[in-house]
Amino acid sequence: MATPPETLIAGRFTVSLGQPMPESGGGLPCFAAKDSRSGDTPLIAIQVRRDSPARAHSLQMLGQPIDGLLTPLAHGPAPGPRGEAGYFVICPAPPGPPITGRLRPWPEAALISLALRPIALVLEKLAGHNVTHRAIRRNNVFEGRRGQPLVLGAAWAAPPALHQPALFEPPYSAMCHPAGRGDGRIADDVYALGVLLLTLALGRVPLADLDDAAILRRKLELGSHAALVSEERLPALISDLLRGMLAEDPEHRPTPTLLLDSAVARSRRVAARPPPRAQRALPVGETAVWDARTLAYALGTDAEQGIGALRSGTAVQWLRRSLGDVQLATRVDELVRQRLADTPGEEPRADAIMLMRAVTAIDPLAPLCWHGTALWPDGLGPLLAASGDSALAGKLHDMVAVEAPANWGSLRPERCDVPMLRLEARQNRAYLGTPGPAGGRSRLTYMLNPLLPCASPLVADRWVMRLADVPAAIEAAITANPKAVPLDAQLAAFIGARGDSRIETETNALTGNAQDVVNLPELRLLAELQVRYHPRPLPALAAWIAGAAAPMLALWMNRPRRRELTERLKALAAAGQLLPMLALLEDPPGRSADAAAARVAADELNRIDAELAAIAAGADERRAVATRLGQEIAAGAGLLALTAMLALAVLG
Amino acid sequence: MPTVARPPRRHSLVWLQGLGCGAVVTLLPAMALLLGVLLLPGVLAVLSDQQPGRPVARTVLICGTAAAIAPVLALWGAGSSMDACLGLLGDLRVTGTAWSAAAVGWILAELAPVVVLVVLDAITATRTARLRAERNKLVEEWGYEGEPDTNADAHE
């Protein structure tokens, strides 16, 4: 039996599914890969999960290899290990295993020369490309031979920071939904590099006995530096560096360029005072809150309890009396009063807005907290992709509908680009409000995730990521299951999101529930797709449309003409071209003539009905006429006889 | 004040007819007797026919009159004497003919409307059948029973 041809990624790379490399993908499924042009270079292919799209911006920006980093070389669809549709990012193979299993205390010189400087250099170059790494963690940093600089793993096959443990993330990122952490800033990579340095300096994982939630609580209560470093004995240089690198405020962390000169970087002193602690704890749900940052975290991640604490005034009272921050208490109190004075309409959304504003007022460094979910606005796309149709997706829908990110940005203008946030929020809301099956949350999700494959069940066995893939995928789906409807809401939204202005008209013309039937707008869109992206025949799809063309044929009034069109449609379907079928069904002059003839026929029918009704109603009149006429005839016959007798009498 | 249109006054000619009959009875009693006997069915028909214009009585009278012309001329030729009148009335053929003619007139007046009605119904049935055939053809061709939806563009 002949083996199927291997799928080439970017026309040159093949995935060797028989050679898994589980340690090289930073936690993601990874396989060896080959370059068909220069087969010597060891490569890896990291598999992308269907609901966790690869990072389009990073893949686009990183065109050239960067030393010390597994730079992406190519990406594309290929069959997965179980024969399923897969998508892989091709990178150079790491020089050795990850440091996970090889932890040992590193001397200060090695830390600086083999870890800090090489990685800072990589981060500097990434920052130059306006790209962040967001995957610096133990299992994604690789060590070749002893004395070789560390190499950063790939971070492109999943949304940013999706797989980061809380230890390696700043607390304001760790508290977010893993898919909603966003690209962040290079300062977040500096933070992760700081944790990596600490891990290498200690030769063990700090806070290894705590889970992610406990680590996050500790970081919030004590501050990251105090939580991770305070009880450890470290070289002075490393300790000074970590004080800056683990600063809570990203503005206070040294830049990668500054880290290249460790002496300069250590001289940059950062005040790392622990946050003020209250005299007594405030219980918010299951969290005992002792400081303002933890209060913001508790309010933001436990919406029900948070709204209760705000509405009842216990949070304000605690801020004023136990924490002693009167100004902050007054600000939060104003927010709550403003909400309570509002009209009760749209209560869940209004409460969510109040909660978001309160969290931002209490902790300006905190991410956007919406109804119990924390996220950074640039993480909205991956979070939507991960949420599917869950309750979280509904909350995100509300968030976009009220342009919450713009509102959130206006509360902390010094820390974000408010005009840009406002613009994006408005755009997202417009996508969300696009009417018809091609709009809504699905459209927004595809718009925000350029590498997210189409989630339609119809094409679930394929990785459909571009418009050009759609016609062939539909053709294959119809061939496999002739009863399937070739255009559902997911496909419509996907086409709308990936399409350009040339097919926008056709996409926006889709109305109603596209899952029921294929009508003229759907056929127009499919025909446009075939013409523009897939000029080859689509016989199965064409045959399906010919067989299900009743709604389109119903636009023609004349039944013999319909039968004739059905026959011609079947004949055209054999060729697999949709455009002639569309032309046959649309045919504006023919349709006008048909409509005019239909009107004439209707008038004729009405006339006949009127005449039949008159006949049915005219029986009495007819009888009266017959009586009158018959009597006249009888009288006429009598007169005739009389005249004849008179004539006989006169003549005779 | 608006004026109300009055219906035109109809002048009765019964008194004139009575005067004519009285004159005939006075001047020509034999002729009056002969006419009275021969036209007796017509007179009875006039009394019994309540339809406007008395169409049945009219036909009966006309037919009876046609049959009475010959006996009247014969009586006139015989000098309009009472004996000749009784002689004519005694002739069963004269009286029978006159009364048979009146009967034929009555039958004709009764049957003619029926025949005309049958003819009219036949014509109507033919027309109805043709219309139904046309209608069925239209329904088959255009597929609607009542008012058709000619706004086909609205389906898109």
Image (cartoon, coloured by chain):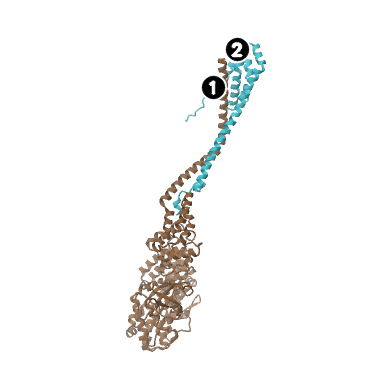
Label the brown chain with its letter: A
Q: Circle 1 — which element?
A: loop
Residue kind at label 2, given as amino acid type? Trp
The residue identified by callout 2 is: B76
Indicate the position of residue A230 as horizontal and vertical percent values. Answer: 42, 86
First in residue order: circle 1 vs circle 2: 1
Marked residue chain, label 2: B
Marked residue chain, label 1: B
Rendered position, A520 above or below A179? above
Residue kind at label 1, given as amino acid type? His
Rendered image quadrant of residue A162: bottom left
The residue identified by callout 1 is: B11
Q: Nearer the viewer, residue A115 or A306?
A: A115
Circle 1 Cα neighbour tier, 10 Å, few/some/many (<14 / 14–19 / ≥20): few
Indicate the position of residue A228 as horizontal and vertical percent values. Answer: 43, 84
Circle 2 Cα neighbour tier, 10 Å, few/some/many (<14 / 14–19 / ≥20): some
Examine the rendering and report whether any part of residue A434 can be seen: yes
Q: Colour of chain B?
A: cyan
Q: Quadrant of the C terminus of chain B?
A: bottom left
Rendered position, A402 above or below B118? below
Q: Is residue A237 left or right of residue B135?
A: left
Q: Nearer the viewer, residue A23 or A138?
A: A23
Examine the rendering and report whether any part of residue B50 can be seen: no
